[in-house]
Image (tube, helix red, strand yellow):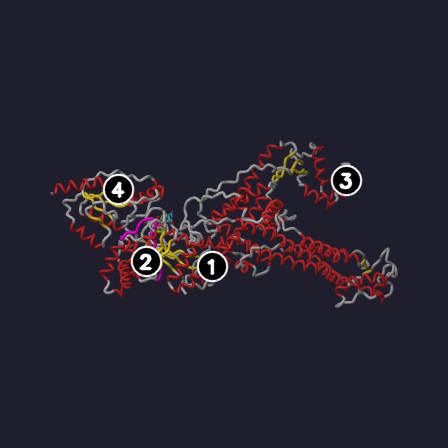
Amino acid sequence: MNLPEFAVVGHPNKGKSSIVSTLTRQDDVSISEISGTTTRSQSFTCSVDGQPLYHLIDTPGFQRPRQVLAWLEQHADNASQRAETVKAFLAEQASQESNRFQDETELLTPVMQGAGIIYVVDGSLPYSPEYEAEMSVLQWTGQPRMALINPISGADYVPQWQSALSQFFSIVRVFDPMSANDEKKRAVLSAFAELYEPWRHQLEQALQHLEDHSNKLEAQSAYLIAESLGRILSETRQIKVPVQFTESLLKQQLATQYQKTLREHEEHFRQQIQAMYALTQLQTDAGQLQADFPDMFDQSTWYIFGLDRKKLIALSAAAGAASGAIIDAGVGGASLMTGALTGGIVTGLASLAATRKTDALNIKGVPLAGKMLTAGPVKDTGFAFVILGRLLDFADAVGSRNHAQRQLLNVQERGMTHRTKLLSKTQQVQLTRLLLKGQKGLSQKEMTLLADLIRALRLVDE
Amino acid sequence: MSHLPDSEASEFFLKRSASFSLFLWLSFCRFVEQGKVLSLNSQACSDISSSVSGTPTSLQQWLTLWQQQAFRPQHLIRLPWWLWGVCLITGAVTMSGVLAVQAGGIINIWLPLFLFAFFPCLLSLLTAVSAASSPEKPRHPPLGYHWLAERYQLPDFQPNHLLLRPWLARQLQQGASLMVLGGLIAFFVFATFQEIRFYWSSTFIQNYETMAAIFHWIALPWQLWLEAPALSVVEASQFSVQPFAEPGQTEQSSELWSFVVAAVLTYGLLPRLLLMALFNYQLKSRLGRAIQTSVVPEQFLNHQQHTVSIDPLQQEEAPEDQPQDTMPVATKTETEEKATKRPDQQEPQTETEIKSQPRIQEPALTGYQVGWRLSETEIPVRHNLGLASWQADEDWLNQLSTVETEAIALIADLWQIPTGELADIAEQLRDKGVTLRLILINAQNIAAERTDVQLKTWQFFADRHQLPLEQSSKHDLMASLTHDTERSEGKNG
Ligand SMILES: Nc1nc2c(ncn2[C@@H]2O[C@H](COP(=O)(O)OP(=O)(O)OP(=O)(O)O)[C@@H](O)[C@H]2O)c(=O)[nH]1
Ligand SMILES: [Mg+2]
């Protein structure tokens, strides 16, 4: 069975392409403020999980409706042949070389091939009789048709339009493709379902699919936030400070590198979110992460012979090679076991060796011992909340964006204070605990819990 | 608790063995990350899609298409065969070493038992305990991972650690099992060509009955299939008692080999195999979860089904046969294929070109005024076009005497959208030799930014049809028009 298919038609520049874009979740439909943007009919498909649900055809606006109507009236023998006459009109245009009625041909062709009609008008401008020619032509096609009033810059004339349109269209609805939320999109789709009985079932199923899909996206984006958050919170970066080196110089360098990595994580997250909401063309004003990390360097360990502490412990434990050196360093045999177990002894040894014999540890100018600087994870709950807030703000802004919108996405800062009110007291404590734990990395279970909490923190417009 | 959506995607990826599933998934993730687009020619789609258009109609079909086009056997990472060979040989060599310890072929039974049964069993236990209690937290990759990763294009450890850890653990178990297997093979080879006799000795246990009891306990797991060494056998194989003088006892002591083999199988091999199964299961369940929570399938679909809008500007330059791999044609169906352009309508220029503020002059009202779809009846124009039928407009145009109207000002409401019909009228008037001007009045009070947009649209229209464009407020226009009309009426009268 064929999928439901609707041609979105109307006067030029009334938001036809915008409606197609929003209702098919395709952000590549040409939309511009200049009239006559769309010059060819093009079908766009709304799919969920790879399954096509319905097609919307973006069409050019009527340019010469009165002339078309005149042609039709001249060529129709009687009222019962109206649809035939429209077909005859299309056939004649197709046979001609230069087609004055190209816009009309483009928009009427899909309709005569069986598409339903969605007629779009602007509810912020008054109705005037000039629209009657367009509506009459559409009536001639005999196809099921409905009208959408798009309140482009206000709803002042909506009632006026409603009464005018009801003479030509069985269904009239108000729909704003720029600001419609999910609920309004569903409402307008159920109006489509009423339009033509054979398509009703498919459209009702489509509605169900869309609803399931938006729930799925919500769940998955929560996981994405949780994962990205975990990645940022547990990020560490290390750098070796040779003994002769000034530490402060390298600290600066490490701090810059560290911040850069965090930004990359965030940027990656943003791309992922955009790609999952099918908004890859999107430009946003979301700024880069700027932060001071007060306690970034509270970890520093010694390394020796180009090995870090971990490897040293592993090596000495395995081979027992260190024992001689330990005795040499004056550490008693009794403390050997406990020391090796905690690993502290090796660090101590390394620092001892490094400080005691710096000269001896050089081989051809290559320093072999020194301090290991580790940046991160940032052990600050405030920092964790800020990052979570940033990720949520971005996901909310992208998630509620309609595909027709083309301007820069303004990422609103909602702040975590407002969001945390959505959680119960217990949940707030749980969240804080998870954020603190996040520096060490979260287990799968904790990740699931975090994703659940994050889902509750999402704010959806309207 | 949030429930996860049941995932079509995890169904697809988990069809086969755990290892295959893992690398199928990782290869898929890489494909999506690279942003490549599948080819949708009819050949490619015919076997997977039942739809008329030939494009896939479900996630399963899309994924199948991906697997056909982008998944290569080399994406399936297998550790090299020689690594397994090394494991096998290590086991065999160790066992040979053990068996060759004493030239006479008399071997302390505890040595092979320890090396091939109890020690591996202990390691397996430790592995099981650490697998059960191990945090799933990201840690450093295990020793040697970098080396493997470099040689066999393994993915980064950190982001995939949840999946890679069970996979690696499974490989490790496989290696360990092969070692035990190698030992067993070596044992059988030795036993075929040489008599192997096991003995036991102990400092503390002199009583062979106690030792028999110990053997009995060890043999508990397999006692249904194979009996534990009999008392007499244990007695005969005690080293200190009788160094194998009598032939009958020799026979008995060599009976111990089945006990050793059974112990190796039960304590050395079986736990390894169980662990392999465990890690397989762990990998599959984690993979299933990762796929369900992943946004990658959604990104994949969005990318593949993205419809590129027909760009009127590019349309003319690039003919239809654009390369398939650069342009997703998934859902694009042009309803009309003809590429002929109307001569009178060029495409909007690029936005920047139009963005410049409209060059609109103040009108100087002279001559003959005609309205275009004016809804304001107070504006006294000679004729208001565009509202009645097209025939009526044409009739009026035909009767127009060009002598008295060499210049006409077309007055239109800024809020109208200029259409082809207005262009037609302008053209017909110009054909008659009339000089035309467009005057816009702003009759509605609507947001200022929309006024600018409307002006741009009109400016664009005026430029395209070479019409001078002027703007006036309704008030000014009314005043000058009334004055103008009075004057001309006075002249007539
Ligand atoms: N604020 C607002 N602007 C809208 C709305 N709908 C459309 N627009 C704007 O109106 C302009 C025209 O929109 P399009 O969707 O291109 O209109 P169209 O009917 O396809 O135009 P043509 O293809 O030229 O016939 C664009 O600048 C849109 O941003 C709306 O609901 N609200
Ligand atoms: Mg358009």
Q: Amino acid at mark 2?
A: Ser
What chain does badge 1 belong to? A
- Determine whether the residue tagged by mark 1 lies in a helix, strand or loop: helix
Mark 3 packing: few (<14 Cα in 10 Å), some, or many (20+)? Answer: few
State how far apart marks 2 and 3 are (Cα).
97 Å
Q: Amino acid at mark 4?
A: Lys
- Determine whether the residue tagged by mark 2 lies in a helix, strand or loop: loop
- Determine whether the residue tagged by mark 4 lies in a helix, strand or loop: helix
Q: Nearer the viewer, mark 4 or mark 3?
A: 4
Q: Nearer the viewer, mark 4 or mark 1?
A: 4
State how far apart marks 3 and 1 are (Cα).
71 Å
Residue beneath disc 1: A209
Mark 1 packing: few (<14 Cα in 10 Å), some, or many (20+)? Answer: some
- Determine whether the residue tagged by mark 3 lies in a helix, strand or loop: helix
Residue B304 in the image, given as x and y percentages of width and height: 46, 54
State how far apart marks 2 and 4 are (Cα).
32 Å
The magenta span reads A114-129
Residue beneath disc 4: B474
Q: Nearer the viewer, mark 2 or mark 1?
A: 2
Q: Nearer the viewer, mark 3 or mark 1?
A: 1
Q: Amino acid at mark 1?
A: His
